[in-house]
Amino acid sequence: MRNLLKTGLTLALLLAASGAAQADDQAIAEKLATNHCAVCHTFKQGEPHGQGPNLFGLIGRKAASAPGFTYSDGFRQAMAEKTWDNQLLDAWLTDTQTVAPGNAMTYFQDDPTKRARIIQYVQSLH
Ligand code: HEC
């Protein structure tokens, strides 16, 4: 009985710790995205576009489809028919000019861990 109680307590503590780790992870992701993207992008639903389009609900949305944002010709041509998923976003953040030559967002992130964190944050915008 005592042992059972102990096991239960340990489990509860472990669960609490992993919950806290997840919250930390999300905070790190949010900070990275804010530092790297918020100069040009807004994240919350209904916020006005910046130099780049609002990113709320990006994953699963058709590329170049944010209402009221004027995309560059290069972006519209390269991205027609594409839908944002994690893989496309990863390629985009690695080198925007390879994905859509002549687009208006200059950004390169060669650290896969940073990209994964930024994607994690963008994914949470729903
Ligand atoms: C210096 C400004 C700037 C920064 C910094 C920037 N972007 Fe952009 N972003 C743009 C512009 C401008 C466009 C529109 C591109 C075009 O029309 O050619 C864009 C477009 C996008 C799109 C396409 C959205 C759609 O509606 O299809 C995504 C996704 C995106 N940015 C994600 C990000 C993320 C994530 C970051 C941070 C890692 C980031 N951007 C950093 C300026 C920026």
Image (cartoon, rainbow, N blue to C red):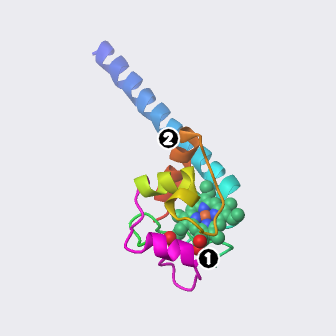
> In the displayed structure, would residue 78 be above or below residue 92?
below
For the residues bearing labels 2 and 1, Cβ distance under 8 angstroms: no
Look at 48% across and 53% down and name the residue there: 91
- In the displayed image of the protein, which residue is found farthest to the top? 3
Look at 40% across and 59% down and name the residue there: 85
Q: Residues within 10 Å of mark 1 (few under 14, many from 20)?
A: few
Q: Quadrant of ligand 1?
A: bottom right
Q: Is residue 114 magenta?
A: no
Query: In front: mark 2 or mark 1?
Result: 1
Q: Is residue 82 magenta?
A: yes
Q: CA distance from mark 2 to mark 1?
A: 27 Å
- The amino acid type of the residue labelled 2 equals Gln
Count of marks overlaid on the render: 2
Look at 61% across and 76% down and name the residue there: 47
73 or 86: nearer the viewer: 73
Q: Residue 113's spot in the image, x, y percent?
A: 55, 39
Residue 9: which quarter of the image?
Answer: top left
Q: Residues within 10 Å of mark 2 (few under 14, many from 20)?
A: few
Residue 107 falls left or right of residue 74: right
Quadrant of the image containing the C terminus: bottom left
* Picture disc at residue 38: none
Quadrant of the image containing the N terminus: top left
Residue 38 at least partly seen: no
Which region of the structure is painted magenta?
64-86
The residue tagged 2 is 22
16 or 78: nearer the viewer: 78
Label 2 or label 1, whichever comes before in sequence order: 2
Q: Secondary structure at mark 1?
A: loop
The residue tagged 1 is 47
Q: Residue 69's spot in the image, x, y percent?
A: 58, 82
